[in-house]
Amino acid sequence: MDLARKHYSRSDVKKEIYEYSTGRWIAAESKPAGDRRIFFRYWRSGEPIVFRRMEDVERLFREYGWGRIRTIYATANVYRSISATEKFEDPSNIAYTSPIWDIDGSIEHWREILVVARAIVDFLDRNGISKSVYLLWSGEGVHV
């Protein structure tokens, strides 16, 4: 079993992805085809990929192949309605937005990555934002 499948098969990982992604538009990045990055944003039926049930996380892998998907992305915006692509283009449909800082690096420099993350968290804290701040490891970096 490859590393991505092993990771995404874990029930705690699927639960975390589902809970964060509810109300958001999903994109799944495939392993590269040469120099091209490939993203899946629609179910094979043509509807935008959204997770309405936790089982939809696994459905994504069944539809596009366990061996192909390497990363799952969700929009920063949470939408009031996720029924059609046009809904994502309507600013009045945005319920709220989760600003995210993406700190890229390499696993060898994880300490430096955490120093940068700490600087961002400290800045937010000094400006009254602390209860809704969280860190997520993402590949070889961190999202704040």
Image (cartoon, rainbow, N blue to C red):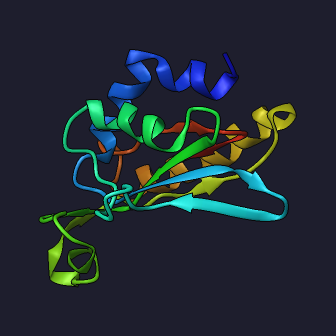
Disc tally is 0
Q: Residue 37: percent from the left, percent from the top?
A: 70, 62
Q: Residue 31: percent from the left, percent from the top?
A: 70, 47
Picture layout, residue 100 above or below residue 67: below
- Does residue 139 show up? yes
Residue sitting nearer the eye, 39 or 17? 39
Q: Residue 8: percent from the left, percent from the top?
A: 51, 26
Residue at 36% over, 55% down:
43
Furthest residue toward front: 45
- Does residue 118 show up? no
Residue at 36% over, 36% down:
59
Picture layout, residue 12 above or below residue 112: above
Residue sitting nearer the eye, 54 or 21? 54
Residue sitting nearer the eye, 40 or 104? 40
Q: Is residue 74 rendered to the left or right of residue 109?
A: left
Q: Is residue 76 rendered to the left or right of residue 19?
A: right
Q: Residue 27: percent from the left, percent from the top?
A: 46, 56
Quadrant for residue 32, please give it.
Answer: bottom right
Residue at 43% over, 24% down:
13
Picture layout, residue 124 above or below residue 135: below
**Quadrant for the N terminus in the image:** top right
Q: Is residue 83 rendered to the left or right of residue 24?
A: left
Q: Is residue 1 rendered to the left or right of residue 143?
A: right
